[in-house]
Image (spheres, grey):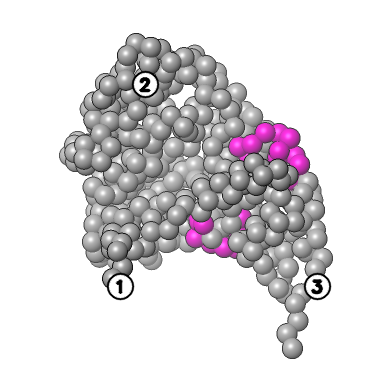
Amino acid sequence: MPDPLSLNIQHLKASETIAIATEAKRRKAAGEDVYDLSVGEPDFDTPELVAEAGIQAIRKGYTRYPPNIGLAELRTAIAGQLSQLSRGRPVNADNIVVSSGSKQSLFNACFTLFGPHDRVLIPTPAWVSYPQIVQLARAEPVAVAGDLEWGLKVSVRDLDRAHSKLTKGLILCSPCNPTGSVYTLPELRAIAEWAKANDMWIISDEIYRRIYYGSGPAPSLLDLPDELLERVVIIAGASKAYAMTGWRIGAALAPPRVAKAMAALQSHTTTGANHPAQWAAATAFGDERVEADVERMVATFRRRRDRIVERFRTDAPGIEFVEPHGAFYFFFRVDGIRERDPVGGAAFCDALMQDEGVALVPGSAFGDDRWVRLSYAAGDRVIATGLDRLMRFIDRLASVPAATSK
């Protein structure tokens, strides 16, 4: 019998991060003692001002079809914030397309820019959906391994080795999911200059830009001169910085022709994003009073990051990890825990869940199964107990004799 499914989804795999979070919730609902350090969403409530704006939008009857490209008020607020974060550079709200989450913004960009026979470079480890979205566009994702000595980031040299005449684009994420690494402005400039010289598109996923442990916002491609931004799409959204994951508001800033094409694509898929949620997001991006909530959340993430880094240095000094400078992820390597009988990330996470009830995400979800991702977007008690159990499991794993062959 012929396969009833379309070739469009022949490579499609379900999101592993979503599957793990779902399984952790199932176990907890069944009464199991589970500490979920897998999920990639802030454990904070949406700021009160933002939530109230959404409620008022419903009460005012803003529940009909919104503009396909997004409310003018929201696009203006996003443009204003992007301008402010990049030291006042002009940002045209007409070039912003609002979507149902940044994942749709990424899909719109990839589907608009790439197609059959195109190759798209993806620095790895990378968020699970990048290669899937590229494949849905009928293009080929090309993993480019990051350098451990450089926080698993890629250099121009790495990109150049992976480049071919079919390469059309690059998806960059900074601050990075899953590593927490952040590209410096000189590093971004070098990559942008290389992309321009090779007629490449850059899709820059900056959804975690506000969650940065340096001074100010994380460096952005928007901090670079205009001549380096002619083939750049910036992805933003409300989910992470404003604890609005469930509101589903993302956005893309693109050159005019690309923004117009993305809007046309969206008009045949979802049309405009949730109408009341757009009004709430306009308050998030546009009301300065919300900034205090963002600053408190980032300060909490920084404190948690510091605690986890110190715990690993003290109690697991032999384990390699990437010290995060942004986002809320801690990426550590597990294949060296038993040097003579290495364990992969998937096996490590399965055993950790079974033995200790702690949910983490294996590096296989991000393209490298030697690693594991821990999310510290969880309550302090969950993190503290989860770390205790994780360290106990690591100690026990390290003490198991290597398997012998007969």
- Disc 2 vs disc 3: Cβ atoms closer than 8 Å? no
Of 122 and 41, the residue lying toward us = 41
| Rendered view: 343 above or below 112 | below
Of the 4 image quadrants, the one containing the C terminus is bottom right
60 left or right, relative to 199 = right
Q: At 38% across and 42% down in the image, what residue appears?
A: 103
Q: Which residue is mark 3?
A: 401
Given this view, does label 1 or label 3 mark the residue nearer the observer?
A: 1
The spot of residue 127 in percent (x, y) is 47, 50
Quarter of image, res 156: bottom left
Q: Which residue is mark 2?
A: 276
Secondary element at tag 2: helix
Of 25 and 336, the residue lying toward us = 25
Secondary element at tag 1: loop
Quarter of image, res 61: top left
Callout 2 environment at 10 Å: few (<14), some (14 to 19), or many (20+)?
A: many
- Magenta range is 365-387
The spot of residue 360 in percent (x, y) is 63, 50
Which comes before the other along the chain, label 1 or label 2? 1
Given this view, does label 1 or label 2 mark the residue nearer the observer?
A: 1
| Distance in Å between CA atoms under marks 1 and 2 | 46 Å
Which comes before the other along the chain, label 2 or label 3? 2
Q: Amino acid at mark 2?
A: Pro
The numbered mark at residue 1 is 1
30 in the magenta segment: no
Q: At 70% across and 40% down in the image, what residue appears?
A: 383
The spot of residue 167 in percent (x, y) is 28, 61
